[in-house]
Image (tube, rainbow, N blue to C red):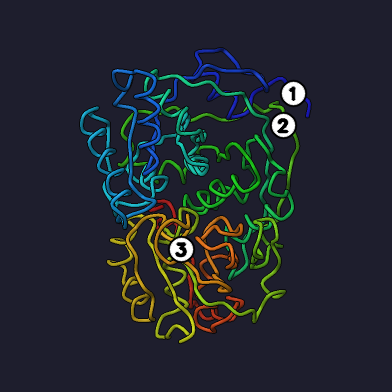
Amino acid sequence: MSGAGSTIAQKILARSGGLPSARVGQIVQALPDFSYSHDYAHFAIEALEQMGAAGVAHPDRIAICLDHGIPPDTASQANKLKKIREFAHEQNLAAFYEVGTGIAHQVMLERGWVVPGSLAVANDSHACSAGAVGALGLATGETEMGFLWATGKLWFRVPETIKVILSGRFNPGVYAKDLMLDIVRQVGVLGGLYQVLEYHGPAAAHLSISERFTLCNMSAEIGAKAAIFPFDEVTGNFLRGRVRAPYEPVSADGDAEYARTLRFDLGQIEPMVALPGMEDRGVPVSAVQGERIDQIFIGSCTNARADDLAIAARILAGKTVHPGIRLLVVPASRDVATHITRSGDMQILLEAGATLLPSGCAICAGSHQGALADGERCLSTSNRNAPGRMGNKNAEIFLCSPATAAASALEGRIADPRPYLQAGAARRPSNRERSSHA
């Protein structure tokens, strides 16, 4: 824990606050480089109006992407989205993404709004996804977002950082989601409260942006404020041709001070499933193999990118979903849906019996589409499984990887994906695919 240097989070917050450095626990009045919102922007708009603000301070630094309850299924929700559209137009925001474009966290990275070394703020707990490209993504509430839009400023307390060192390689059938479920199991749902996970180690360089996205995204499930990967060649390849502004990558000092260090050998990770009730109830798939399920959801900002859906498609190719299973597939964005349509994976999923829903949060947030009945069980690639998360406190949610979800869809019960991955049945993406598409 010794050292006088700075972590990545400390450096980004110091720069954003116009300071030479920022110590842990210090309050920094920051000027975020970018902020974004979704359907809940209407709360931020109301807060801004109640403050008496004439408008937003930096419209060129704000984007809104409608993703939660889309398309709207009530007049009330439709009116809220209408208000957001009108606000985005009146304020001339940098970007407004309509229903079906995708999940905000995904779209902001795809469209190049979030860049390495930047401070990105969103009124959503999974703003931490921005760490996949070396940005510091911090979540805030709707009232705070309204204040940020009105003034261009927001204060943050500088968090401690946990150093996570990754080594080894995943075995066939094991993926970033399995690693994250194991991390959550070991750390606990509040084990990283208001801290930052900073990923390092020889294995980190071999992870795609999509895999990094999964690991940063679910840092929220240990209570972390953020998670971040240092900039490297994989990051640069992904950003080439899509970033909208120059950027300055940030790296931690060699003598940076960390709250603690966690080490994970990827080769020791097994396919994991989180039991209903809490995200830290992870167990090896073998412990729940054969458990009954009714619905499978392959979607969410955690695991619905092109590589995730390609993995599922390879397992489902030429096969049919079990007749007792409802398989819902929701690509993380329209760009992802277009990509898998061109690759042929979309056709495989549909011919296997998947039901395709518009790109957005869908069933994950429990506010729209795919609600569960009393006593039903859903196996999901999303990030949360607390009671009521999918709209019914009397239903149960298991969390898993896309591979485990696909294998289970075939068997009609929770299944180990590894037997389906023989003879290249579900190859990993090539290096070019891994670096070029999220």
- Left or right of 60? Residue 398 is right
Q: Distance between the residues labelled 2 and 1?
A: 9 Å
Tell me where residue 416 sits by quadrant. bottom right
Between marks 2 and 1 in the image, the one whose residue lies nearer the viewer: 2
User: What residue sits right under mark 3 in the picture?
Assistant: 308
Which amino acid type corresponds to the residue marked 2 in the rendered image? Tyr
203 relative to 17, above or below: below
349 relative to 198, above or below: below
Q: Distance between the residues labelled 1 and 3?
A: 39 Å
- Left or right of 87? Residue 134 is right
User: What residue sits right under mark 2 in the picture?
Assistant: 258
- SS for dot 3: helix
Inspect this view and state whether residue 212 appears.
yes
Q: How crowded is mark 3: few (under 14 residues within 10 Å), some or many (20 or more)?
A: many
Which is nearer the eye, 387 or 430?
A: 387
Which is nearer the eye, 99 or 374?
A: 374
- SS for dot 1: loop
- SS for dot 2: loop
Q: Residue 3 carries which label?
A: 1
Which amino acid type corresponds to the residue marked 3 in the rendered image? Asp
Image spot of residue 325 (x, y percent): 48, 80
Among numbered discs 3 and 2, the one appearing first in the sequence: 2
Which amino acid type corresponds to the residue marked 1 in the rendered image? Gly
Which is nearer the eye, 432 or 244?
A: 244
